[in-house]
């Protein structure tokens, strides 16, 4: 496989929470994509809570951007476990991904 070549790169929008970048790219077959948008975010960690029955614990959260409530994986795992379960989990599984898919 051959990587895409970045011909030009410029920031469309920058904030402390993330950036939006526009790249002009040349594909291995020679095709040019004038505007390929890339979301840049700081590193973060995703975690899920599993019950003994291996079921995922979800919470209902309001998201203003979607103007509704959504079921989401629980994010503040340790704080939630201690608060609602009275203890922390016995096992901690960690999966790291340096460059999430765009």
Image: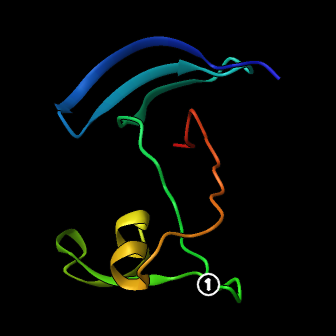
Residue 8 horizontal/vertical position (percent):
41, 12
Q: Residue at x 70, y 19 (%)?
A: 3
51 relative to 6 in the view: left or right: right
Residue 44 horizontal/vertical position (percent):
41, 43
Between 100 and 52, the one lying in front of the other is 52
Between 84 and 27, the one lying in front of the other is 84
17 relative to 40 in the view: left or right: left
Q: Secondary structure at mark 1?
A: loop
Identity of the residue furthest to the front in this view: 87
Q: Tell me: residue 2, above or below residue 96.
A: above
Residue annotated with mark 1 = 51
Residue 42 horizontal/vertical position (percent):
35, 34
Identity of the residue furthest to the bottom in this view: 53
Q: Quarter-wise, where is residue 35 in the image?
A: top left
Q: Residue at x 55, y 41 (%)?
A: 100
Q: Quarter-wise, where is residue 53 in the image?
A: bottom right
Q: Quarter-wise, where is residue 89 in the image?
A: bottom right
Between 56 and 29, the one lying in front of the other is 56
Give the quarter of the figure containing the N terminus: top right
Label 1 crowd bin: few (<14), some (14–19), many (20+), radius 10 Å: few
Residue 84 horizontal/vertical position (percent):
37, 84
Q: Residue at x 49, y 55 (%)?
A: 46
Q: Tell me: residue 58, above or below residue 15.
A: below
16 relative to 57 in the view: left or right: left
Between 25 and 59, the one lying in front of the other is 59
């Amino acid at each position: 496989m051959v990587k895409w070549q970045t011909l030009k790169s410029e920031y469309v929008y920058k904030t402390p929470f993330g950036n939006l970048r526009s790249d002009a790219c040349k594909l291995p077959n020679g095709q040019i994509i004038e505007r390929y948008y890339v979301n840049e975010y700081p590193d973060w960690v995703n975690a899920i809570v599993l019950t003994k029955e291996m079921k995922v614990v979800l919470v209902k959260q309001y998201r203003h951007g979607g103007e509704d409530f959504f079921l989401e994986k629980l994010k503040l795992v340790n704080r939630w476990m201690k608060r609602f379960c009275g203890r922390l989990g016995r096992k901690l599984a960690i999966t790291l991904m340096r460059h999430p898919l765009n």
